[in-house]
Image (spheres, rainbow, N blue to C red):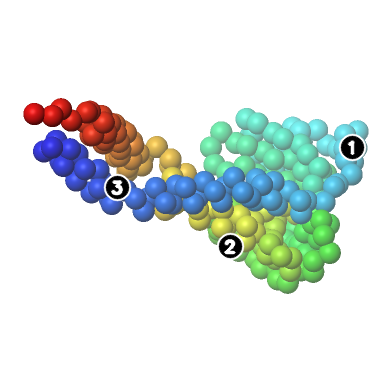
Amino acid sequence: MKVLKLSTQLHKWIALIVGLQVLFWVGGGLVMVAIPIETVRSEHRVAEQAVVPLALAGLPALDEIARQAGVAPIQADLHGTPRGPTWTLKPASGDPVIVSAITGQPFAPMSADEVSAFAKRAYRGEAEVTGVSYLATAPEETGKTGPLWRVDFADGEKTSFYVSPSTGEVVSRRSGVWRLFDFFWRLHVMDWDDGEDFNHPLIIITTALTLSIVVSGFILLWIRIARDVKSWRASKRPVRGD
C-alpha cells in the first residue's frame, strides 16, 4: 500500500508539472494537422507565371559581368526576375552581389508603385493592396536578412508578400494563418525564441517526465485492476458454515 500511495503521489505531481505542456503539445498538434501546409505557406495565393526562356545570346559573358561588378565569384547563378535577367555572384567571403545580367551593375532602387505592381502580378486573387512599406531590416518571420519590401493584401488571411528590393521577386510569403501556425509550433517545440531548436534540454526533460507519467499510469492501472480482481474473486468464494 505504501508503494501504491507513493506512486500515486508521484504520478499526480509530475502530471501537474508537465500537464500544461502536454496540453500545448496536443493543441498545437491539432492546429498543425488541421491546417493544410499549403495554406500555411500561402501557396494558394501564388499566381501562375509563364516561363520565359532567357535570351543568352544577347548577354555579356560572366567574366565581363564579374569584372564590371568588381566581384571574383566562386559561384554564380543566372536566372530571370521581374526586373530582367540577373546574376547572383557569391564571393569567397561576404554577402552575394546581385547585378543585372545585361549591364553588370546593381539594379536601381524601386518605387513603392513598382513594388506593388510586381507583388500584384505574383498574387493570385482579387484582393487589393492595402500597404507597401520598405523595411531596412528583414523581419524575423521572413527567415531572410537585409532590406525587404512588404506588400499587404486585403484578403481573409491578411497575406503579406516580401519583395526583394533588388530583383522585385517575392522571396517570402506570410499571413495570419502562418503566424497562428508559428505560434503553436513554438509552443509545441518549447522554443519561444525563434522555433528553430526542437531538441533542446528542456523539451527532452519534459518528454522524459511525460513518458514517466504514462509508464507509472500503466503500473498504477495494473495494480488497481489486480486488486479489484482479487477483491472480486474473494467476494465470489462460497461461505462455509460452522
Q: Disc 3 marks which residue?
A: 15
Q: Tell me, for residue 136, which label it has, or none.
A: 2
Residue type (three-letter) at the residue carrying disc 1: Pro
Q: Earlier in the sequence, mark 2 or mark 1?
A: 1
Q: Disc 1 marks which residue?
A: 53
**Viewer-nearest of discs 3 and 2:** 3
The residue sitting at the bottom extreme is: 130
Residue type (three-letter) at the residue carrying disc 2: Ala
Residue appearing at x 69%, y 51% in the figure: 39
**134 relative to 227 in the view: left or right:** right
**Residue density around tag 2, few if under 14, some if 14–19, many if 20 or more, within 10 Å:** few
Quadrant in which the C terminus appears: top left
Whether residue 40 is visible to the viewer of this picture, yes or no, is yes
Q: Position of residue 64 (x, y in %)?
A: 76, 36
Instruction: Give the answer, above or below, for where 84 lies relative to 228.
Output: below
Q: Earlier in the sequence, mark 3 or mark 2?
A: 3
| Residue at disc 2, secondary structure | loop
Which of the 4 image quadrants contains residue 230? top left
**Residue density around tag 1, few if under 14, some if 14–19, many if 20 or more, within 10 Å:** few
**110 relative to 187 in the view: left or right:** right
The residue sitting at the left extreme is: 242
